[in-house]
Amino acid sequence: MKKALLVIDMQNICVGEEHAAYFKYDNEALIKAVNDVIASYECNRVVYIKNVMKKSIISKLAPFQAYEGTKEVELVVGLNVVSEYIFTKYEGNAFSNPMLGDFLKEQNIECVEVVGVDGGGCVSLTSLGALKEGYKVIVNESAIGTMFEKKKEKYFKKLRYVGVKFI
């Protein structure tokens, strides 16, 4: 079974040295854990997902801003970037960008492993999106940052119920 790694939102805004105060992860430990998982994959099986905000009145009121072309949306310094496969999303589920699904289909990927931030948001939403697209899903808890514990618990319970594998 062909498997790919989806590295979710490991960006300066979330886990960089000058990350937004809103985000409270153990950045060094998380980057190391994600890098350890990246190292276990062939380079052509690692896909990076970046979350970008669209400029609007609502986004200007958010506790942080991450717009296209700013340093905040760049992949965090220290993250092992081993491929040029980088996809942008504008909402929680990375599969909201149809180019991601097209790319994975072209590569004959059947299963995705998901790491990154946040367990109570984009990681879980992308996992659900992958299931909906027909992929087998592995959630690697050792390389996931979570701020929203209650949401994570709810999502992870649902993911387990629908057959997602947790490692």
Image (spheres, rainbow, N blue to C red):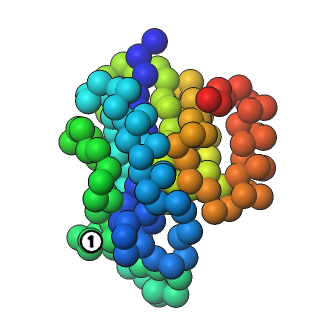
Q: Which residue does the image show at 56% across and 53% down from the upper left?
A: 145
| Residue occupied by mark 1 | 71
What secondary structure is found at the residue carrying circle 1?
Answer: helix
Q: Which residue does the image show at 21% across and 42% down from the upper left?
A: 84
Q: Residue furthest top?
A: 1
Image position of 24 with respect to 138: above or below: below
Type of the residue with mark 1: Lys
The answer to which quarter of the image holds residue 126 is: top right
The x, y position of residue 146, in whole percent, is: 61, 56
- In this orientation, does residue 104 appear? no
Image position of 85 with respect to 120: above or below: above
The x, y position of residue 50, in whole percent, is: 37, 56
The x, y position of residue 59, in whole percent, is: 48, 80
- In this orientation, does residue 48 appear? yes
Image position of 81 with respect to 91: above or below: above
Please give left or right for residue 128 compared with residue 55 in the image.
right
The x, y position of residue 125, in whole percent, is: 59, 48
Image position of 73 with respect to 43: above or below: below
Q: Which residue does the image show at 60% across and 40% down from the upper left?
A: 141
The answer to which quarter of the image holds residue 36 is: top left
